[in-house]
Image (tube, grey):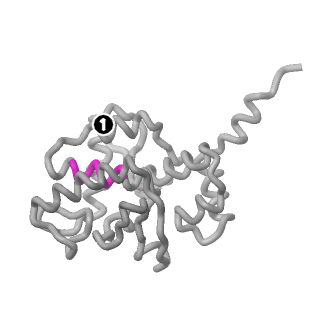
């Protein structure tokens, strides 16, 4: 039976790093697979919203510095986010592949073979299909990769103010609510440490 979220709200599910690795490994080495792998790596390791990632252009990438400039953030806000070397390596593979396809700076970073923009509907269909192929039973979607990124940053001890800037939230309070919703592990861990008298 197909699961739909029309009119329903699902509890956020984050992926483990092992599940993300399986998802990334499920793509082919053809140009589309290289592109999809790079897109997932960018979503997972930057926490970008899907529309932010799909509207990136090569001029927005500073891979030497490990930075991506987001010009079309939520509410029309722009920001600069960090990206790690692992995601950069996958992104560079796609940039090399897209150059062989004749794509240039006038095409968005993540585009179809002939330069057409990728629609969010394509990602909505593609991610669950490849998640099943990777043997992941959780609901896998682009925003879930953003949740996973935020939860990982928090578990690594990153300051909530920095997480807020990376995610493009308008305030730290928004980020705190966001993290409490997707990664309530402080409460779970505290209660799990209680002992019977």
Asked whether 98 or 121 is in front, the reply is 98
Query: Which quadrant is home to the C terminus?
Result: top right
The image shows a total of numbered marks equal to 1
Asked whether 138 or 30 is in front, the reply is 30
Q: Quadrant of residue 188?
A: top right
Relative to 16, 53 lies left or right? left
Residue at the (31%, 48%) spot, across then down: 127
Query: Which quadrant is home to the N terminus?
Result: top left
Query: Which residue in the protein does label 1 denote?
Result: 132
Magenta segment's dominant SS is helix
Q: Is residue 195 above or below residue 130?
A: above
Relative to 162, 123 lies left or right? left
Relative to 52, 105 lies left or right? left
Residue at the (10%, 59%) spot, across then down: 100
Q: Is residue 28 above or below residue 59?
A: above
Magenta-highlighted residues: 34-41
Q: Is residue 140 above or below residue 135?
A: below
Dot 1 surroundings within 10 Å: few (below 14), some, or many (20 or more)?
some
Residue 39 lies within the magenta run: yes
Give percent across and percent down for residue 45: 44, 51
Residue at the (17%, 62%) spot, across then down: 112
Query: Residue at the front extreme?
Result: 64
Q: Quadrant of residue 193?
A: top right
Query: Residue at the top extreme?
Result: 197
Asked whether 12 or 63 is in front, the reply is 63
Give percent across and percent down for residue 174: 64, 64
């Amino acid at each position: 039976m197909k699961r739909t979220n029309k009119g329903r709200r699902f509890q956020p599910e984050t992926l483990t790093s092992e599940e993300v690795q399986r998802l990334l490994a499920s793509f082919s080495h053809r140009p589309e697979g290289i592109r999809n792998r790079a897109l997932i790596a960018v979503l997972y390791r930057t926490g970008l919203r899907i529309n932010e990632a799909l509207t990136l252009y090569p001029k927005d990438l500073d891979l030497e510095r490990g930075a991506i400039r987001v010009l079309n953030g939520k509410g029309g806000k722009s920001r600069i986010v960090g990206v790690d070397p692992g995601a950069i390596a996958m992104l560079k593979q796609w940039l090399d592949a897209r150059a062989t396809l004749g794509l240039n700076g006038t095409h968005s970073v993540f585009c179809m073979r002939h330069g057409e923009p990728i629609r969010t509907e394509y990602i909505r269909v593609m991610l669950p299909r490849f998640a099943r192929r990777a043997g992941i039973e959780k609901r896998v979607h682009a925003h879930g990769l953003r949740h996973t990124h935020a939860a990982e940053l928090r578990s690594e001890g990153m300051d909530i103010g920095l997480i807020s800037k990376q995610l493009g939230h308008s305030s730290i309070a928004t980020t705190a609510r966001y993290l409490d919703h997707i990664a309530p592990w402080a409460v779970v861990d505290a209660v799990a440490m209680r002992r019977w008298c």
